[in-house]
Amino acid sequence: MTNADSGAAQPALDTRRHFHEIASEFDDLYESESRTSLRRWSDSMLRASVYRRFELVFEQLGDLDGKSILDMGCGGGRYAVTMGKLGARRVVGVDFARNMIELAVALRSKEGIGEDRVSFVCGDAAETDFDEPFDYGIAMGVLDYVEDAEGFLRVVLPKITTRMVASFPVKWSIWTPQRKIRYRLFKNCPLYFYSRARLESILGGLGLRSWKIHPAHRDFVAVMEP
């Protein structure tokens, strides 16, 4: 590995370490029963984009019966397990944080979903080979941490045949400066933000059949058809 390669790899390592360390805390956002009323109210205000992204994914993918889906950056498996429960034929969740994968496997077991329907891989979705393409792909809360979003999409889109849904954090938001400073100074985890113009430029350059951008509070959610 060259010095340049080593420098480029460091942000990815810092991001992986961050999500490995906060896996349980982050996954608790989806467990309303485990949080106090004050915490639920706080999350509903500060994490509104997380919940809206979840809704948008299922709105945009529609009927999942018999479909195959690749969940990139699957976290604790909330999307993947829900997709399995909604009739998806095959869901593969990929995340590079080992603690996230352990949470996802535990959730799958709790919900009684078989590994033949929903499986999890610890790794990088862009670098993982699969035996067949997927009907759908999602990358929610992933492009926040990817420096070259266009390069990432060019690698993963060939794995998807029908539709891809991905979120991009909004650049011009009152929350952006504090989030960027907090992650950089206290978590050593770089973040990347997008203006609508930049996102349109990225999507327009990918040679997609069609694409559309939906607002989701502090995020854009892009729906792409390869």
Image (spheres, helix red, strand yellow):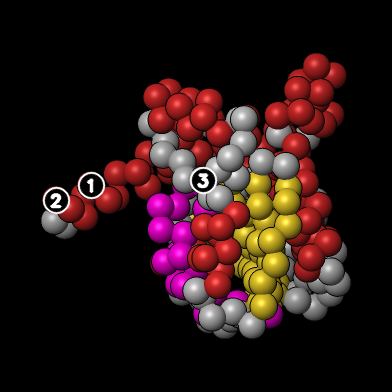
Which residue is at a point 56% across and 68% down the rendered structure image? Answer: 203
Asked if the residue under mark 3 is in contact with the one under mark 1, i.e. CB atoms within 8 Å, the reply is no
> Which residue carries the number 1 mark?
7
Residue at image location 67% in from the left, 78% down from the top: 210
Residue 189: numbered disc: none
- In this rendering, the count of numbered labels is 3
Instruction: Indicate the secondary structure of the residue bearing disc 1.
Output: helix
Q: Are marks 2 and 1 in contact (CB under 8 Å)?
A: yes
Q: Is residue 190 magenta?
A: no
Extent of the magenta region: 143-162
* Residue beneath the point at 41% across and 30% down: 184
Residue 207 lies, in percent from the top left, at: 54, 80
The local crowd at label 1, few if under 14, some if 14 to 19, many if 20 or more residues have their Cα within 10 Å, is: few
Residue 46 against residue 93 in the figure, above or below: above
Task: Name the residue carrying label 3.
Answer: 193
In this rendering, does residue 103 appear at all?
yes
Identify the amino acid type marked 3: Phe
In the foreground, 136 or 213: 213
* Residue 150, x across and y down, in percent: 46, 65
Check the image and report above or below for 28 versus 205. Answer: above
Disc assigned to residue 3: 2
Q: Earlier along the polypeptide chain: callout 1 or callout 3?
A: 1
Disc 2 marks a residue whose amino acid type is Asn
* Eye-nearest disc, 1 or 3: 3
Classified by dominant secondary structure, the portion drawn in magenta counts as helix
Image quadrant holding the C terminus, namely bottom right
Any magenta on residue 155?
A: yes
The foreground one among 181 and 146 is 181
Residue 48, picture quadrant = top right
